[in-house]
Amino acid sequence: MPAPRLHSVLTSFSRSMKDARELASDANKWSIPPHPGTRAQITPQRRDTLTEMAFLRAFTSWEMFLEETFLLYLLGHRPPKGSPPRRYGFPPTPDAAAEWCTEGRPYAKWNASEAQRRANRWFKDGKPFTPVLQGQQSRLDQLTTIRNAIAHESSSAKVKFETLVRAELGALPPAMTVGGFLLMTKPASAPPVSFMEFYLGQIEQVAFKIVPK
């Protein structure tokens, strides 16, 4: 099958990453007073909230990308560059492909672990998903930890997030919010980038390997 569908999915994903970056950047700018002695447009608390919203949008777009590309590959679509994966199943329709992935459940989860499990079942060597996702498993786990810290107020989600912050910064700053962490510069990054930019860059690299162009 031709490549336009997969190219379209990749383009939409890239646009969502751009939108997330711009929202986080705008929130940071709005929180800085334009001139000495003047008030900023938003408070630091609002800045952090908007940054967290931007990250959630990016994370949701990432899981949608995994779902859409998986189903298209399962239906036999080709990437813009290279060959399609060798399939072990041939669903007759898009609805059938989606049903195969839900496996009798109300809906399918599209985190990295579930995508790998399905890829190993339906594609030879799990390609293009398993090798790429395994190579970035640690970073993808961090993405999930950050997402859960934003979306859930459980003590477990908070503890995992604080553990991540300590591992990255060497200590847990007081009153650290998820948004505040995402806007911080990642230590030893060259050139210097925020954690937000670092994580979005990581999933973009994975996406470009799943759908080479």
Image (cartoon, rainbow, N blue to C red):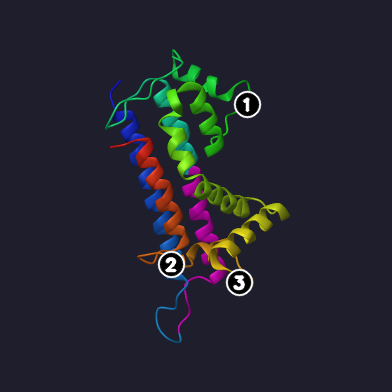
The label nearer to you, 1 versus 2, is 2
Query: Which residue is pictured at 34% across the width and 31% down the height?
Result: 6
The label nearer to you, 3 versus 1, is 3
* Residue segment shown in magenta: 38-60
For badge 2, the amino acid type reads Ala
Q: Which mark is residue 188?
A: 2
**Where's the C terminus, which quadrant?**
top left
68 vs 14: above or below: above
Query: Which residue is pictured at 59% across the width and 28% down the height?
Result: 107
Q: Quadrant of residue 113?
A: top right
Report, in whole angstroms, how far the alpha carbon at label 3 lies from the one at label 2.
18 Å
* Front-lying residue, 168 or 55: 168
67 magenta-colored: no
Report, in whole angstroms, how far the alpha carbon at label 3 lies from the one at label 1.
41 Å
Query: Which residue is pictured at 35% across the width and 35% down the height?
Result: 211
Q: Which mark is residue 114?
A: none
Numbered disc 1: secondary structure: loop
Numbered disc 2: secondary structure: loop
Q: Which residue is mark 3?
A: 173
Considering only order in the chain, which callout, 2 or 1, is on the residue closer to the N terminus?
A: 1
Magenta-colored segment: predominant secondary structure: helix
- Do we see residue 154 in this rendering? no
For badge 3, the amino acid type reads Pro
Considering only order in the chain, which callout, 1 or 3, is on the residue closer to the N terminus?
A: 1
For badge 1, the amino acid type reads Pro
Q: Which residue is mark 1?
A: 106
Q: Position of residue 67 (x, y in %)?
A: 47, 32
Asked if the residue at tag 1 contacts the one at tag 3, i.e. Cβ–Cβ closer than 8 Å, the answer is no
Numbered disc 3: secondary structure: loop
Q: Position of residue 112 (x, y in %)?
A: 52, 38
